Amino acid sequence: EDQVTQSPEALRLQEGESSSLNCSYTVSGLRGLFWYRQDPGKGPEFLFTLYSAGEEKEKERLKATLTKKESFLHITAPKPEDSATYLCAVVGGGSNYKLTFGKGTLLTVNP
Amino acid sequence: NAGVTQTPKFQVLKTGQSMTLQCAQDMNHEYMSWYRQDPGMGLRLIHYSVGAGITDQGEVPNGYNVSRSTTEDFPLRLLSAAPSQTSVYFCASSSPSLDEQYFGPGTRLTVT
């Protein structure tokens, strides 16, 4: 059974204070790891897909990295508009088309 | 493109009532899925479909039925609503690779 654990559950930063969110996973044959952003009262919004260890992707102030056991979402010089819940999900080789999500990290960036 | 649309946005049901949550996408995606999101539980997969006429169960399928007669539509049926089905329901679609899933705005369901 695929498992995803995200930490911390909540993170409060000052504007401009860089940090990282963690996503640890257990999966048989990773087919893909996904990062999503979710604003209150809305559906998740896709950010990144990572397929293999060592892969990195960037978008504005966000950078996602992947190892064989975990992924990090690095946030550089965050702004208040980066405040949201960040979700990590995986799909494994034995899971067909079933995504397993973590519980998310609630990020708050204060001005 | 409207993307993924869901109706209704809010619904209150009494225990034992049945209803259908509607989901439609206009991106010609083969893969569609339903999730429920509960506080402290994250998103959990209910059912999914990889194409018209093909559906399969996810992590929490009990009490829910689905069908996929067209590429565009993927309705979720609650057969006999229970208070444990109080949740926010999200529909999503993507290519079969699951890359870049598009989520709908959600349906907030309360069962009393």
Image (spheres, rainbow, N blue to C red):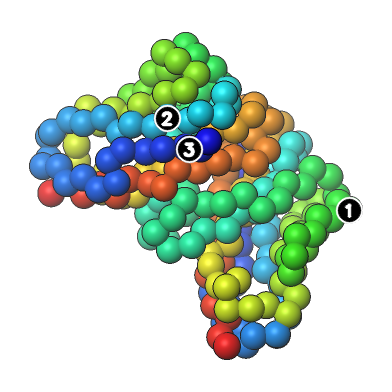
Is B13 left or right of B95, judged from the image as shown?
left
Measured as percent of width and height from the top left, residue B13 is found at 15, 42
Can you see residue B33? yes
State the separation of the CA atoms marked 3 and 2. 9 Å
Secondary structure found at label 2:
strand
State the residue in front, A80 or B79.
A80
Q: Could you tell me if residue A95 is visible in this image?
A: no
Residue B62, by quadrant, is: top left
Residues indicated by labels 1 and 2 sit on the same polypeptide chain: no
Q: Is residue A85 above or below residue A96?
A: below
Kind of residue sitting beneath label 2: Ala
Pointers 3 and 2 within a single chain: yes
For the point 74% across and 36% down, which residue is it? A31
- Residue A4 position, x and y percent, is 61, 52
Residue type, numbered disc 1: Gly
Q: Residue at x 41, y 25 (%)?
A: B74
Q: Which residue is mark 2?
A: B24
Depth check: give the residue in front, B13 or B56: B13
Q: Is residue A106 above or below residue B64?
A: below
Q: Nearer the viewer, mark 1 or mark 3?
A: 3
Q: Chain of mark 1?
A: A
According to the image, label 1 marks what residue? A54
Pointer 1 with pointer 2, Cβ within 8 A: no
Whichever of callouts 3 and 2 sits on the residue coming sooner in the sequence is: 3
Residue A56 image-quadrant placement: bottom right
Mark 3 = which residue? B2
